[in-house]
Amino acid sequence: MRSAMVVGDLRVQKLARAGGGWSYTIVWPDVTVDEEADSYLRTHEGSGSQKTYAYFLVDHLRWRIRERLTTGSVTLLDLLRYQGAVGAKVAMPYGQPWRVPPKRPYGTSALEISASCLKGFYLHQCAMSGVNPELKAALEARRLPTRADRDRALLGHVKTSMPVNPLAPKRGTRRRHPKMLPDGARGGLLDVVNTARDAMVVTWLSDTSMRIGGLTGLHLADLHLRDNADCGECKSPHAHVCHRWGNPNGAAAKIKPDWETVDGVVTKGEIYRVSPAMVSSYYTYMTTEYAQYAAGHGMLLIQLAGPRRGEPWSADAARGMLRRAGRRAELPGRIRPQAFRHQFTNDVMDASNNDPQVAKAAGNWASAQMVDEVYGHPDLHSPQFVAVLNKVWGEQA
């Protein structure tokens, strides 16, 4: 069993950065740094990928110890075995499962991240140390470009090949029906939340496509909740979601567009239009709970109970609040922040007659093509869809 082997001694070490934020590395039980892991993770310094890759990489290095492998001896088949042991479907024996209960096997997204991490780590080590050229050659495989590859690339018509990750799981077409909120979720949640802060979170997630990291990372200075704000970037009330490394609650926006403060006014970043309901919930929260407990740190969402009352509220705490509220409201399934984003985009597509450009702009999505592929499907029960079928079938309306 895993627990009987000394494989859990490697761990991720979190380090405070002088300029704010955190760095991540991997250390041994005696707190010496694993040089291979550290040299790779340093290539992601200043990005959110460093934390993600650190936790995926430490799991792989623990498995590698069990298998008595090193960077110089590991092969592509070994890496495929590892992917199989953590949840991938591989056409080969992979040995004992690595992620055993209570841990769950990786899903498709996690397997893709693991594949990207492993490919980057071993290509970096092979290049730095000059070892294992066979593995390096196998990981540098390429394939012919597809039409989508050519459409996405500048001068795509001259591309002759594209890099491919042999460790990545096979994917079918993009899932066309992402997980939405249960029917009546917004009203049900608002009926059972306990605080004005929680009601504000539900309202803001419902009326925008804002991610939970962006919402819990908001500062009061990011909110321009009146017409014709001084930033001059949006005439209507709006919020600027800005990626900051130094937030005391560890929250950070996923997308990192440039932003700056000009004459005390926040500009640029991701801009989200704010609804009247969002403004109303904001003022209710600010004039009651925030005014009573705020500690002067400048962040929007704060803890309302316990010894750290008044300090910034974390994204994990917000997720827990939504999960518990969903249970109290007796909503099916687990309420996740991402479901609000999917629901908002789907509702915008319905209201705009499936116009992906409108949904892209309203939801700050990177690609209208992706929005169309995921959300641009017809409602199989809509009157318009039924009318089209009846016309084709020759039925009377």
Image: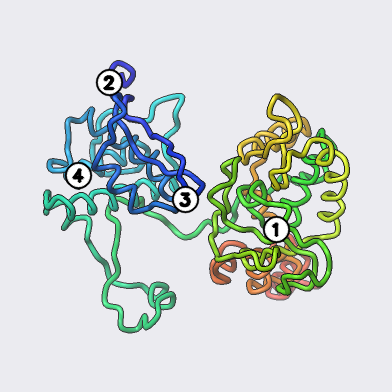
Residue 165, given in percent of the width and then of the height, sits at: 30, 57
How far apart marks 1 and 4 lie (CA) works out to 49 Å
Mark 1 and mark 3 residues within 8 Å of each other at the beta carbon? no
Label whose residue precedes the other's in the sequence (1 or 3): 3
How far apart marks 2 and 3 lie (CA) works out to 29 Å
Numbered disc in front, either 1 or 3: 1
Q: Is residue 210 left or right of residue 223?
A: left
280 or 248: nearer the eye? Answer: 248
Q: Amino acid at mark 2?
A: Val
Numbered disc in front, either 1 or 4: 1
Mark 2 and mark 1 residues within 8 Å of each other at the beta carbon? no
State the residue at coordinates (76%, 67%). Answer: 351
Label whose residue precedes the other's in the sequence (2 or 1): 2
Q: Which residue is mark 1?
A: 222
State the residue at coordinates (60%, 48%). Answer: 213
83 or 237: nearer the eye? Answer: 237
Q: Amino acid at mark 4?
A: Leu
Query: Mark on residue 48?
Result: 3
Label whose residue precedes the other's in the sequence (2 or 4): 2
Q: Which residue is mark 2?
A: 6
State the residue at coordinates (28%, 28%). Answer: 96
Label whose residue precedes the other's in the sequence (4 or 3): 3
Label whose residue precedes the other's in the sequence (2 or 3): 2
Query: Mark on residue 56?
Result: none
